[in-house]
Amino acid sequence: MDGPSGSGKSSASKGVARALGLRYLDTGAMYRAMTWWMLRNGVPVEDADAVAARAQDPVLESGTDPDAPSISVDGQDVSEPIRTREVTNAVSAVSAVPAVRARLVALQREIISGGGIVVEGRDIGTVVAPDAPVKVYLTASEEVRAARRAKDLAADPGASVTVTRAEQARRDRLDSTRKASPLAKAADAHEIDSTELGLAEVIEAVVRLAKE
Ligand code: C5P
């Protein structure tokens, strides 16, 4: 399941995994964990060469239980710190580095090779799993996506709605225009626009596709 930020991918992917008894992988969390580690280790994230030079260093582990997804770096659970505004604003730069993508795509394919899994990201249908049996591209209007992200504001009172919207637009632009595997809809993906749909309806639509 691919789509831009705030399209509802995470809730929908987890819901579909639960409904079908499958595992769940949040690839965005892996890029965030890599970014958290770079910031933590003083790597200048806008310097692609510096990021590439350290891309093999962090030890990443992803839990795939949709009821308790987890991500750890060097043995430390980073589920919370990877959601900060600092990481969110740095992640597009780190994820544009080919060495980072090569390493994380390899890890993702290893996890996916076990089968029975719902994977969410930006390049799953196009690059990571081009042979996936069901591909979904989830979208929503910019307004709805910003409103869904607004709940993140609670964790960071320093970010106004206007600033958050601007930061999200910047991240989507960077993710869609980068050279390495930009956010894209696979030719054979089913596009679902969740602007007018509730979560349960999105899950139902995807489950229906999976059972076809
Ligand atoms: O899904 P989430 O918003 O947590 O993803 C964080 C960031 O990770 C995205 O903005 C994007 O830069 C990167 N990403 C990616 N490829 C993926 C998943 C996420 O480049 N498959």
Image (cartoon, helix red, strand yellow):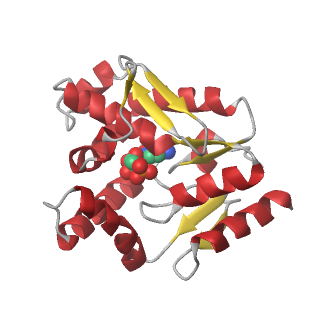
Q: Going by the picture, which residue comes out furthest to the left? A: 158
Give how far across and how far down residue 117 sits, in percent. Answer: 69, 42
Q: Is residue 185 above or below residue 104?
A: below
161 or 21, which lies in front? 21
181 or 171, which lies in front? 171
User: Does residue 178 appear anywhere in the picture?
Assistant: no
Give how far across and how far down residue 108 sits, in percent. Answer: 57, 32
Report whether 140 appears left or right of 124. Answer: left
Quarter of the picture containing the N terminus is bottom right
The residue shown at (17%, 62%) is: 159
Report whether 115 appears left or right of 52. Answer: right
Q: Going by the picture, which residue comes out furthest to the bottom? A: 196
Q: Is residue 42 above or below residue 166?
A: above
Give how far across and how far down residue 25 sits, in percent. Answer: 57, 41
The residue shown at (32%, 47%) is: 83
The residue shown at (41%, 57%) is: 176
Report whether 147 appears left or right of 199. Answer: left
User: Does residue 126 appear anywhere in the picture?
Assistant: yes
The residue shown at (55%, 27%) is: 107
Quarter of the picture containing the C terminus is bottom right
